[in-house]
Amino acid sequence: MGVSYLQNCKKCHAPFNWRKKYRILWREVNQPVICDNCGSEHYVTLGGRLVNTFFVIGPLTIFAGIIAPFDNIYLDLGGGILLAFLGSLLVPYFTILKVDGESLYSD
């Protein structure tokens, strides 16, 4: 059995899978992640949302908008979108979840 770097449920300590945490990216802001084992609701913290922005929007903006290494706008945008996608694959490892009732704005 390998080492998991994904967060566990705060109540029953069951691990969240990568796919469930990845879907956080594409949900509404206040929609909870529900533990499959105990049914407790977990919400993304403000820090988790900032991590999402840093890994997805940051590379796209920097590569396609600021650096723009190619003379072709389509290559710049394509490279930025590729980096944003690759960054989004890392988001589940760094997104922090809190149980309903805990403050979403503090660690």
Image (cartoon, rainbow, N blue to C red):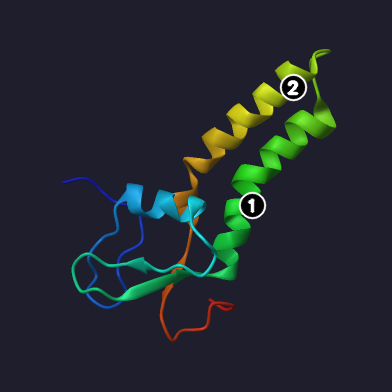
Q: Secondary structure at mark 1?
A: helix
Between 4 and 26, the one lying in front of the other is: 26
Q: Are marks 1 and 2 in contact (CB under 8 Å)?
A: no
Q: Which numbered circle lies on residue 76?
A: 2
Q: Secondary structure at mark 2?
A: helix
Give the percent coordinates (x, y) of residue 29.
55, 65
Say what amino acid the circle numbered 1 marks.
Thr
Does residue 98 appear to the left or right of 105 in the view shown?
left
Return the residue found at the far left: 1
x, y percent for residue 36: 22, 64
As drawn, the label of residue 53 is 1
Q: CA distance from mark 1 to mark 2?
A: 19 Å
**Which of the two residues, 30 or 49, is positioned nearer the viewer here?**
30
Left or right: 3 in relation to 83:
left
Q: Is residue 5 above or below residue 11?
A: above
Q: Which mark is first along the chain, 2 or 1?
A: 1
Position of residue 100 measured from the top left corner of the image (x, y, whole percent): 41, 81
- Dot 2 surroundings within 10 Å: few (below 14), some, or many (20 or more)? many
Which residue appears at 76% of the width and 29% of the height?
64
Which residue sits furthest top? 71
Q: Residue furthest bottom?
A: 101
Rendered view: 31 above or below 56 = below
